[in-house]
Image (cartoon, grey):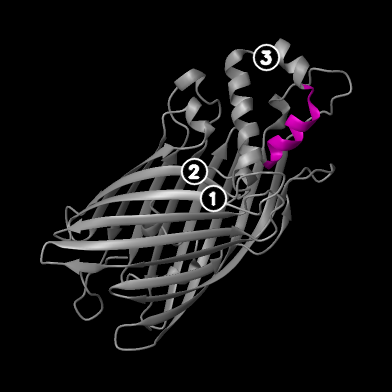
Amino acid sequence: MKEAGDCLPLITLVNTIKVKAMIKKLSTKLLATIAIIATCTLTVNAQQDPQYTQFMYNKLPQNAAYTGSREVLSIRMLYRTQWAGNKNGGTVGAPQTASFTIHSPLKNEHFALGFFYTNDRLGKEHKNQFNVTYAYRVALGKKVKLSLGINAGIMWYKWNGLQERAYDFGDPTVENVSRVLPDVGAGLYVYHPNFYFGASVPNFIKGDLNNRKSVGEAKRTPHVVLMAGGVIPAGKVLKIRPQIQYRYIANAVQRIPHTFDFNLSLLIYDRVNIGGQYRTSFGNKSNNVKLLDPDSFDVMLEVWPTKQLMIGYAYDYTLTKLGNYNRGSHEVIIGYDFGFEKKRVITPRYF
């Protein structure tokens, strides 16, 4: 589900427009969309970075230390569309996210380099991130490695505010925003053929998302991401793979700064993976607000036609009130690993 931090530029607009006047002048479909945005503002996680259902196959944008961990040149392409469908009028400007990653170990096995690009859209808000990643890796045992990684690049943030309309005298004029902000993050990643653990801050530099000449509340803030997973053999055919992801917004002003993804999947013959996932969010209890909010229930399917090619699909069923206006979210991922060498890589790679 899209985070409320993605809605920050909309919060200022919603708070400054008189609700009664809007009801008289806006269409029913647009009203439904604004209601969804308001719900997003009040109830969800206040996070700004994209969130992926198939996070276990797209770790690089969330943890630079993942760079080179597949021990070969590895490419991933992901596309995600949220709040899809026209249920009860649908959602105007529904979120869409695209991601491309490439990374590889270098000739000196202690070093690895990578690159990732993400394009994230929500209504009139567009974000493009370009980051180079670097990792230094050391062996902790025969099959266990510790990787320390950093990422550096830019985020190009755009807000097309000139298409907004003020309906009452005295309402502020909304302008276009175009800002280029630095992206700098770091992480660690411990991995073994049968398990992994990661901790990271993808970006720890704060930034103002408003026009340089204006004053607003839209700010960028650091996120903390923790993830872990393992594979448990259950006979010659089946492997059980439990995985978890935790995300926390460091300076959250919203009441729900935490999210958890609980994932359990079955890998069959190392070629087909069938999984289910439950996503929830929570925060500090205040003003009689519930501490725990169910977010979505997700299902996924990944197949490996060859040991190097992976194709995956995930569907999210929304459990919040946003589900009244959409038919769920869809996510597709394609990956390819080059150059399998027996001396360098163990196949299959579970993570």
Instruction: Name which residue lies at 68% across and 57% down.
Output: 221
User: Which amino acid is tagged 3?
Assistant: Leu
Q: Are marks 1 and 2 in contact (CB under 8 Å)?
A: yes
For residue 32, what is the image quadrant? top right
User: Which amino acid is tagged 2?
Assistant: Asp
Q: Which residue is mark 3?
A: 26
Q: Residues within 10 Å of mark 2 (few under 14, many from 20)?
A: many
Against 88, is 36 above or below? below
Instruction: Identify the magenta region.
Output: 8-18
Q: Residues within 10 Å of mark 1 (few under 14, many from 20)?
A: many
For the residues marked 3 and 1, what is the alpha-carbon distance in whole angstroms? 32 Å
Q: Which residue is mark 2?
A: 295
Residue 294 can be seen in this image: yes
Q: Earlier in the sequence, mark 3 or mark 1?
A: 3
Q: In this orientation, which residue lies closer to the viewer: 320 or 303?
A: 320
Circle 3 sits in a helix, a strand or a loop, which is it?
Answer: loop
Instruction: Name which residue lies at 66% across and 51% down.
Output: 285
Q: Quadrant of the C terminus?
A: bottom left
- Give the farthest residue toward the left: 236
Circle 1 sits in a helix, a strand or a loop, which is it?
Answer: strand
**What numbered label is drawn on residue 281?**
1
Residue 175 can be seen in this image: no
Q: Earlier in the sequence, mark 2 or mark 3?
A: 3
